[in-house]
Amino acid sequence: MTPAVVYIAAFSLLPIVWAVALTFFDFSPRRTGTPFLGLGADNPFVGLEHFRRMFDFSADAPLEVRQFHIAVKTTLIFAFLVVPLNLAITLPLASMIESVGRRSRVLFRTIFFLPVLASSVGVAIIWGFVLHPQRGLLNALLTKITGEYTVISWTADSSFIVLGLPVALFAILVAYLWQDIGYNLVIFVAALQAIPESVKDAALVDGTSAWQRFRYVTLPLLKPTILLTSILTMISAFQAFDLFQVMTDGGPGQPGQEQTRVLTLDIYENAFRFQRMGWAAAVSLVLFLIVFLISRAQARLLRVEWEY
Amino acid sequence: MRHMSRRLAIAAAFALVVGACSFGTETPGTQAPTGSGTETGMAPVNLTIWSHRSDAFNGAIEQAATAYTAVHPEVTFTFEDFAYNQYIQTLQTALPAGTGPDILQMFGTWTCSYSGFLAPVPQDVMTTEAAHEAFYAAPIGGYTCDDTLYGFPHEFNIEYGATLVNTDVADAAGVDWEAGWATWDDFRADALAMTETIDGNITRAGYHFTAADGLSYSFFSLLVQSGGAMLNEDATAFTFDTAEGREAFAILQAMVDDGIIDPVLFNDEENWVGDCYFEDLCSMGLVGPWVVRDYEESAPDIAAATTYVALPPNEGSSAFVADSGWGMTVSKDSPAAEAAWDFIAFATIDPENAAAFNLTSGSLPALVANGEGAGRDALVAEFPHFAPFFEILPDGQYVGNLPDRDLVWYDIAYPHLLAGLQGVESVDDMLAAMQREANETFG
C-alpha cells in the first residue's frame, strides 16, 4: 500500500462509494437517521426509487424531476454547442498563430491563455458588468450605435429566444468560450509545431494549395489532438458550474422550465440548498454515466491507428 | 500479513476521511481552559459563534459579545461568518458530523429542520411559555418545535409593510410622501410620478417590489389582507390558487401594467432592490430597514434622503405574513452550553442588550418589551426608520414551521410570480403550479 493508493482511496474511492450508497437512500443531512452514518430511520432505504422517478415524464411529475429533465436537456445542448464552437475557433486561430514569428507567437499564445488563468467567478462577474441591462457595456455600445437608449436583458428575459435557444444560454456560452479557448489553443499550437516539416514539404512539392495542405495533411495529423481536446472540452462543459450559478443561477424561467439550469447546478441545489442528498447523488451518477458514454463514443469515432 | 496491510490501509484511509471532515482534532468552538480562572471563579471559556455574512448583523453580534466579555471576562469569543448559501451547506455538513460551533445563528424558520442537532433551551434560562409571552409570536414561533424551545430570536424579520422612499426624488416629483397612501390607487399614482423613462424604457423604477423577498412577501401578505390564508386549516397545504390569490396578484400586476416597474429588468438577478435603490435606479423599494445599515456607508447621500413610509392597506387590513427571523441556538455537542446559553440570554432576553442589537443591525425587535411603550420610543428616537413598522408588528401572522421555507419562497413562489408578472406564465397556470409545487414540499 503506497501513500498514493491511500490518498486515492481516501479522497476519491470512498467519496464515490459514499455517493453511490446515497443513491439508494432518501437521505437528508438535516435528519439524524441511525447512528450508522445517518443512514436508515429518518433517512430510509428507497432502493432504485430515485432512478425510477427520473423516468416520470408526466406533466404533473414532482418539481425536482421536471428540473432534472430540463437540466439534462440544457446540459446536452450546452456541451454539444461548446465542443464544435471551441474547435471552430481554436483550430484556425492556432494555425494563424503557428504561422507567425516566434516572438509574436509567444505573445499571442499568452494573450489568449490569460483568461484560462482567471477565476470562473471573476469571469462571470466581469461578464455581468458587460451584460447588465442599465449599466452594461454591451447595451451602452448598442445605444451608441443605434442612437436609441437600448435596455436589453441578456440574462433574465425568458422570452428572448434566438435560433430556438434562450439568449441567456448564449450569454453564458460566450463567456465560457472566452475563458476556455486559450487552453485548447495552446494544445493545438504545440500539436501543429510537432508536425514534421518533411511531411509539409512533401505536400508542397506535390503542388498542393494552402487549403489542401491543411485539409489533407495537417487536419488528419491533428486527429489525436482533436480527440484529446474534444474529450477534455466535452468533460469540462458538462462540469461547468460557476458561470451558470453566478450569471443566471439557472434562470430565467419558471420552475421546471429554467433556461440555464444544468446538471451541476441541479446537483448543487438539491444537495446543498434543499438537502435532497440522495436524489442529488442519483443525479450525479447519471451525469457521470452521460460523460462516460459520450467520452467513449468520441474516443471510438476519432480513434487513429497510426503515429508519426 | 498482506491482508493485515490492506486492512490497515483501509483503516488509515477511513481515518483520513473522518479527520478531513472534522476540521481538525480539537472540537471547534471550544478551547480547553487556558488559565487558572478569573475573579468570577469560572474557568476561562472560548465560545465560537457562526453566523451568516452581513456587516450589520455581524457587527451587532460582535458588539453583544464585547459587552458580555466586559461583564464576564472569563468568556471570550471566536467569530466565523459565511455567505448565505455557504452557511446552509456548512450547517448541513458540520452539524451531523458533530463539529459545529457552540453558538449558531439560525434563521427561525430553519430551526425545526435542525432541531435534532440543537440543544433545547434549559428551563432555568426561560420556559417555553415565558418565551411566548416575552417575544412576538412570529419570531419565537420559529424557535419552538413541538412545544420545545431551541433558541431565541434577536429580530422580527419583516420584509413587508413599509417601503423605502427617496424623499429627494419624491419632492422633485411633487409627491407628498409624508401624507402616506390610503389606497393602492393613490400609491400607484405617486409611484408612477417617481418613475423615469427614456425611449419607453424605465431608467428609474417608481417602486421596486420584484426581488425574491419583496415579491413573495407582497403576494402572501396581500393574499392574507384579501381575506385568504397561506395554508389550509390544518396547515397541511398551501392555498394560493384561490380568488384571494388572484386579487392579491392583480394588485401587483397593476403596477407592472402602469409602467412603474419592469420585472424583466428589475429582479433579483438583474437589479436587486437594495443595489437598485442605493445606486439611484429606484425611487422606492420594498426591503426591511436593515438594508439602510448595510448601505449607509457606501451611499450616504441616498441614505440621508431615505425614509420609510407605510404601504397602503388592502380592504382595510394591514395584516402581513411574517417569518421568524435570525436568532441564536446552541449546538447539542457544545461542551460549553451553559456559558453559551448565558450569553444568548444576555444578548436576546435582556431588553437593553436586545435593543442595542436591533439598533446596530437595523433589525426590528423580537422582544415585545422593545416593540411597545418606552422601549419602542427609545428605538424610534435612535433609528426613525423603525417607526412605520411598529404600527403593524401586532398584525404579523406567523407562517408556521414549513418543511422547507427557502424552497417555497425562493425556488417556487418567487420564480412563478416573476414569470406571471413578466407575462410568460398565465395567472391561472402560475397559481396552480405554485400551489401544487409548494404542496409537494409537505412530502
Image (spheres, rainbow, N blue to C red):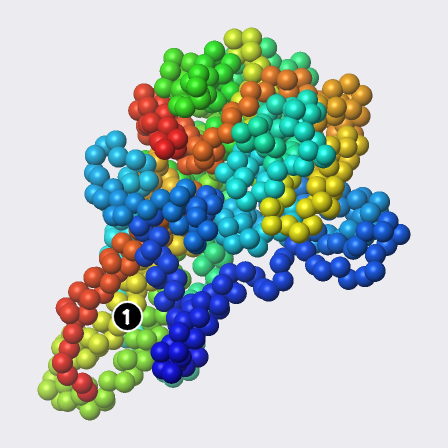
Q: Is B284 left or right of A18, judged from the image as shown? A: right
Name the quadrant of the N terminus of chain B: bottom left
Q: Which residue is mark 1?
A: A229
Visible residue check, residue B358: no
Please say whether residue A299 is visible from this viewpoint.
yes
Depth check: give the residue in front, B156 or A240. Answer: B156
Name the residue: 58% across, 64% down: B24
Q: Position of residue B215 (x, y in %)?
A: 48, 28
Q: Please identify the residue farthest to the top as the structure is shown.
A: B316
Instruction: Determine the image quadrant of residue A287.
Output: bottom left
The correct choice, above or below, for B344 with respect to B46 in the image is: above
Q: Picture quarter containing residue B234? A: top left
x, y percent for residue A240: 36, 57
- The image shows residue B24, relative to residue B227, as above or below, that is below
Q: Secondary structure at mark 1?
A: helix
* Residue at horizontal 82 percent and vertical 47 percent from the top: B72
Question: Looking at the image, which is closer to me, A201 or B62?
Answer: B62
The subunit letter for the residue under badge 1 reads A
Please rate how many residues cluster around mark 1, counting C-alpha atoms within 10 Å: few if below 14, some from 14 to 19, many from 20: many
Identified by mark 1, the residue type is Thr
* Numbered marks: total: 1
Q: Is residue B164 above or below residue A167?
A: above
- Residue A236 horizontal side relative to residue B8, left or right: left
